[in-house]
């Protein structure tokens, strides 16, 4: 094994530098992951443009790799061996708080950079910290005793494993948070990797009707939504979206609306409120907007709508996403459209942001790709 590890480090907003770090000495309760795939999502686009911290950061928070070295206690505690392929959650849990005990590491204070400046989260934590390798845009990543790992089934390719995160979010938000299930009717706004993953989660859970919206630019993604099981797609720039939803549902509206758009302002939430059924629908929101002028609170309460927040995934959602991928029921490999090597991290993030490349759905960083 080489003496150094190459990593792509974010050194300033929209600036990446390749740097070499010493190969870490692995303690008895730690491990080293050889990174095979680091998925990239809309959060990377935001964090690249407006970093949460000024310190240098190895980004990459959706990481899959092979255990290259494992200390004895790490192997025992985690039930893994050198050579095992694992998905590593980006939350580095404390395993002590009520949330960690529930497998809800996303809510653990030790992982939350918003309220805890010393939080540990892959892709967000400063590379000045001991062991340095705290992100997936690198040849190797350091795993402490409290990394959260999931074994990846053998029949799931590295590329497919790269979409575990959006699929986990799909299961968490649609099924666990919004209660999508047998015969549900659902409107999914935005046909990116997250919206398309919701299509799969909803169809698998027994939804009777899945409608997906997008823009004219999303034509290829809307086609993909149909191949994954969407019953109807709507181009919101060509069609009257609300009129179409009401026509499709015979005037009833839908049970659940999932907002998976990015940069669309207030319109998805406003459409969502109108497209929900007369009473007691559920709306999943992203919270991109710090403020919402003229929010129709009266309409929301009159319709008795429940709002849920899109907020990562639990341990169980990841396990179910891996099982879904292993089942091969849906052609999820169609989502994995673009891959880049370590020297092209900047371009890879800009591809997700829609600045470069065509027909991007999901982008993976493959650190060992030339
Ligand atoms: Zn992500
Ligand atoms: Zn905790």
Image: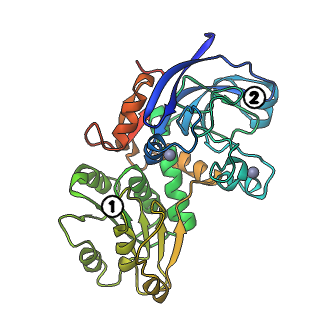
Q: Which residue reaches farthest top?
A: 2
Name the spot of residue 22 as percent of width and height, x first: 65, 16
User: Would residue 119 be found to the left or right of residue 295 on screen?
Assistant: right
Q: Nearer the viewer, residue 315 or 289?
A: 289
Location of residue 207 with respect to 301 vertically, above or below: above
Name the spot of residue 187 as percent of width and height, x first: 37, 68
Name the spot of residue 115 as percent of width and height, x first: 67, 53
Q: Residues within 10 Å of mark 2 (few under 14, many from 20)?
A: many
The tag on residue 230 is 1
Q: Are marks 1 and 2 in contact (CB under 8 Å)?
A: no
User: Would residue 10 be found to the left or right of residue 98 on screen?
Assistant: left
Q: Tally the numbered discs.
A: 2
Location of residue 23 with respect to 274 vertically, above or below: above
Location of residue 311 with respect to 339 vertically, above or below: below
Quadrant of the rendered image containing residue 73: top right
Q: Residue at x 31, y 44 (%)?
A: 354
Q: Nearer the viewer, mark 1 or mark 2?
A: 2
- Say if residue 17 shows up in the picture: yes
Task: State yes or no: Cβ of the residue under disc 1 lies below 8 Å from any atom of ligand 1.
Answer: no
Location of residue 134 with respect to 216 vertically, above or below: above
User: Would residue 270 be found to the left or right of residue 120 on screen?
Assistant: left
Residue identified by numbered label 2: 30
How far apart are labels 1 and 2 at the CA level?
A: 43 Å
Q: Nearer the viewer, residue 38 or 286?
A: 286
For the N terminus, the quadrant is: top right
Name the spot of residue 369 as percent of width and height, x first: 43, 21
Dot 1 falls on a residue whose secondary structure is loop
Q: Residue at x 24, y 78 (%)?
A: 243
Q: Residues within 10 Å of mark 1 (few under 14, many from 20)?
A: many
Q: Which residue reaches farthest bottom?
A: 302
Task: Identify the mark nearer the N-term, 1 or 2.
Answer: 2
């Amino acid at each position: 094994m080489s003496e150094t590890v190459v990593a792509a480090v974010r050194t300033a907003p929209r600036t990446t530098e390749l740097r070499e770090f010493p190969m870490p000495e692995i303690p008895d309760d730690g491990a080293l992951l050889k990174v095979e795939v680091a998925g990239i999502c809309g959060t990377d686009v935001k964090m690249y443009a407006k970093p949460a911290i000024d310190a240098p950061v190895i980004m990459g928070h959706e990481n899959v790799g092979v255990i290259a070295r494992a200390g004895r206690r790490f192997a025992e505690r985690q039930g893994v061996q050198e050579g095992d392929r694992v998905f590593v959650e980006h939350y580095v849990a404390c395993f002590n708080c009520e949330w960690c005990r529930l497998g809800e590491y996303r809510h653990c204070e030790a992982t939350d950079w918003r309220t805890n400046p010393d939080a540990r989260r892959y892709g967000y934590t400063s590379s000045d910290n001991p062991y340095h390798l705290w992100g997936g845009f690198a040849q190797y990543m350091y795993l402490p005793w409290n990394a959260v790992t999931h074994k990846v089934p053998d029949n799931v390719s590295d590329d497919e494993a790269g979409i575990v995160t959006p699929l986990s979010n799909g299961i968490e938000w649609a099924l666990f948070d919004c209660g999508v299930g047998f015969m549900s009717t659902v409107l999914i706004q935005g046909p990116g990797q997250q919206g398309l993953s919701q299509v799969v989660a909803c169809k698998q859970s027994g939804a009777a009707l899945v409608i997906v919206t997008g823009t004219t630019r999303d034509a290829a993604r809307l086609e993909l939504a149909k191949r994954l099981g969407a019953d109807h797609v709507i181009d919101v720039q060509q069609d009257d979206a609300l009129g179409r939803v009401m026509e499709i549902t015979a005037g009833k509206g839908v049970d659940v609306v999932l907002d998976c758009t990015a940069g669309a302002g207030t319109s998805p939430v406003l459409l969502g409120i109108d497209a929900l059924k007369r009473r007691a629908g559920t709306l999943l929101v992203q919270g991109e907007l710090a403020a919402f002028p003229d929010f129709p609170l009266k309409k929301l309460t009159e319709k008795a709508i429940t709002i849920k927040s899109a907020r990562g995934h639990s341990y169980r959602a990841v396990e179910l996403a891996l099982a879904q991928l292993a089942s091969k029921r849906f052609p999820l490999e169609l989502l994995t459209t673009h891959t880049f090597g370590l020297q092209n991290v900047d371009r890879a993030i800009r591809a997700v942001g829609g600045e470069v490349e065509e027909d991007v759905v999901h982008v993976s960083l493959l650190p060992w790709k030339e």
